[in-house]
Image: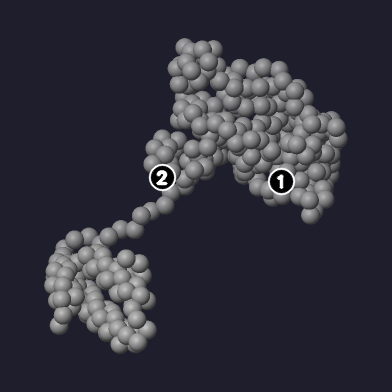
Amino acid sequence: MDEADRAFAGALEACADLDTLLRLKGAYVGREGSHAARMMDLLKAAPKEQKRELGAAVNAFKQRWEEGLKARQADLEAAKKAVGASSWDATLPPPMPARGALHPLNRLMDRLVDVFRPLGFHVEEGPEVETEEHNFDGLNIPADHPARGSADTFYLAAHPGRLLRTHTSPVQVQTLKRYGKDGARLLNEKGGIRFLAPGRVYRKDEIDPTHSPMFHQVEGMLVGHGIGMQHLKGTLEYALRALFGPHTEIRLRPSYFPFVEPGCEVDVSCPLCAAKGCRVCKGSGWVEILGAGLIHPNVLEFAGIDSKEWSGWAFGMGVERMAMMLSQTPDLRLFFENDQRFLEAMGGLD
């Protein structure tokens, strides 16, 4: 056994774990910089008549080292298994797999649904790929409205007239059509209808701390006999106090939305500073939380419901906006980056 083999045998015997063995393997038979690689470099420079003999010697060295490494690896793995078996404690509890959890935005939407369930609201869902008829026409949005432009809406080039819904209001249109096609028979049987429509929506917004091309909304609608703004205000007072606390105040400010008349923006007294003024409410004591109003007669008539007999109200709120306010999160993007530390910290949104 020459000097190279003796050095290898000593290093191999000193390997006490698989990591050390892996490093030794790289040093002796690795592709670059190893003993075997340097021998091959010397072989290339050797005289032609000596290459055959030297080549056989180099291959013999490499084969012996590889066999030694393989045998040592088998010994170390067997020893590791033996240690693991002997240290097993039958009295310890079994390892528990990590458990998943609902995303904070999903939990907040579930919380909103739970607030409205005692009032008789149920959940309606609809497709995220919608028609212009449901997304715009049925909501009294005129053909020249900026929201219908390709600069704001994702249209599907392969399917003319199809788009990614820009709000959850198409669910309202489809639900009203389902109730209206039989001459409001279902409405009369039930004495009205009330539901929530939570889900994802899409708009051509640039990604920044307060905007995203994909976000979530929860919309609510109630249709019945003699429904007015007083019913809307009373329902929202109940719901927002259930969300933010019993001392929460709300105010309605006139605003315009094509699918409601009259329309309003709804503010709540800032729950973070008790309306005293802070960074979130910009010192005003109020935070805008949602848009609402009485359903426009054209929306009811489009669905086949007689607007002279039936009336109702609707509202819509952004889930991310509410989550950011409740958690004082400064950047909307944090909710979509799947940082487990952040998601665990958002457990307070339950």
Q: What residue would you read off at disc 2?
A: 340
Considering only vertical position in the picture, is 268 above or below 122? above
Please provide percent x and percent y for residue 92.
19, 61
Instruction: State which quarter of the image contains the N terminus.
Output: bottom left
Instruction: State which quarter of the image contains the C terminus.
Output: top left
Task: Locate residue 285 relative to residue 316 in the image: left or right.
Answer: left
Residue 287, located in which quarter of the rendered image?
top right
Task: Locate residue 182 relative to residue 320 in the image: left or right.
Answer: right
Front residue of 232/186: it is 232
Residue 236, located in which quarter of the rendered image?
top right
Could you say which disc has been placed on residue 118 in the image? none
Residue that appears at 79% across and 36% down: 149
Considering only vertical position in the picture, is 192 above or below 276? below
Considering only vertical position in the picture, is 178 above or below 29? above
- Spatial CA span between label 2 and label 1: 29 Å
Task: Look at the numbered disc 2 and give the secondary structure of its residue.
Answer: helix
Q: What residue would you read off at disc 1?
A: 164
- Looking at the rendered structure, the kind of residue marked 2 is Gln
Residue that appears at 48% across and 41% down: 104
Task: Look at the numbered disc 1 and give the secondary structure of its residue.
Answer: strand
- Looking at the rendered structure, the kind of residue marked 1 is Leu
Please provide percent x and percent y for residue 136.
79, 38
- Badge 1: few (under 14), some or many (20 or more) residues near its Cα, within 10 Å? many
Please provide percent x and percent y for residue 180.
80, 44
